[in-house]
Amino acid sequence: MEVVIVADREAAGALVADIVVSHVRPGAVLGLATGSSPLPAYRDLIRRRSEGSLSLAECRAFLLDEYVGLPRTHPESYHSVIRREFTDEAGLDRVDGPDGEAQDIPAEAARYEAAIAAAGGVDVQLLGIGTDGHLGFNEPGSSLASRTRVKTLTRQTRADNARFFDSADDVPRHVITQGLGTILDARHLVLIATGEGKAAAVTSAVEGPVSAFCPASILQLHPRATVVVDEAAAASL
Ligand code: GLP
């Protein structure tokens, strides 16, 4: 695992954008994360596209996770969020994600795994980290070998994500998320963590034991994992 400590959020975004660009080629498969951590990287990539130095038109993308029960058109569905914050402006049209409205969730999970495999697997997977060490929506206790499936959010994660909804009660209780085993299949994992609120989770992920209690610790098992942190998130390393 490579840990890169940079000054701040913007520097983290620029570095992650460079990593994404290094993977861009026709047919490249990008694994996208929602949440605030990748936003500076997404803005940097959008800028490069508007300046004419980058085209993602021949890439495709897969999302990590989705809320169960939110219509795709809901502004806080991860489908809507990634289009609004990144892919529409980045000119990346082929975006797939778990369907949170599927009636048969196990069938949808199997479809999603098959779609990723049919695309040739993920070349570079961007990841944020939850304050409890979760990856995607794999909460502590998730099997290290898990595949895409339904999960129940912890109270902590629902509280963390309440800021995107009118009230904490409006945060969905269930999600479909790529499993930790699914994430480990990507060829390059890039975790982005900024701000002091992530310092404890980053320390557990990087220096703690590999354990289901800290899902992000699976990065230690991956042959090509890059952790990009700002000085605040690196404070306890
Ligand atoms: C959500 C997402 C995760 C993300 C996490 C951290 O729970 N499902 O993929 O990593 O939030 O979000 P943020 O980057 O906003 O701190």
Image (cartoon, rainbow, N blue to C red):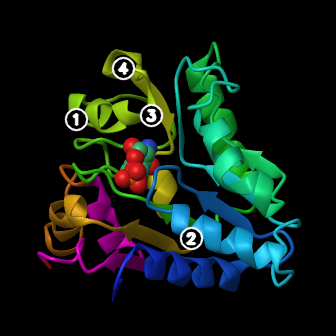
Q: Is residue 228 magenta?
A: yes
Q: Tell me how far mark 2 sits from mark 1, CA to CA.
A: 26 Å
Circle 4 sits on which residue?
167
Up/down of 20 relative to 80, above or below:
below
The residue that disc 3 covers is: 164
Q: Residues within 10 Å of mark 4 (few under 14, many from 20)?
A: few
Q: Position of residue 48 (x, y in %)?
A: 75, 78
Label 2, on which residue?
41
Q: Is residue 57 visible?
A: yes
Q: Which mark is residue 202?
A: none
Query: Disc 3 marks which amino acid?
Result: Phe
* 234 with respect to 229 (left or right): left
Question: In the drawing, does residue 132 fall left or right of residue 182?
Answer: left
Tell us which disc is closer to us: 1 or 3. 3
Q: Nearer the viewer, residue 8 or 33?
A: 8
Q: Amino acid at mark 2?
A: Ala
The label nearer to you, 2 versus 1, is: 2
- Give the residue pinned by disc 1: 156
- The kind of residue on which mark 4 rests is Ser
Q: Earlier in the sequence, mark 4 or mark 1?
A: 1
Q: Earlier in the sequence, mark 4 or mark 2?
A: 2
Check disc 2 and report its element: helix, strand or loop. Answer: helix
Task: For marks 4 and 1, give the one nearer the viewer.
Answer: 4
User: At 22% from the left edge and 35% from the top edge, which residue is drawn?
Assistant: 156
Provide the secondary structure element on which disc 1 rests.
helix
Q: Which of the two discs, 2 and 3, labels the residue nearer the N terminus?
A: 2
Q: Is residue 59 above or below residue 157?
A: below
Q: Nearer the viewer, mark 4 or mark 2?
A: 4
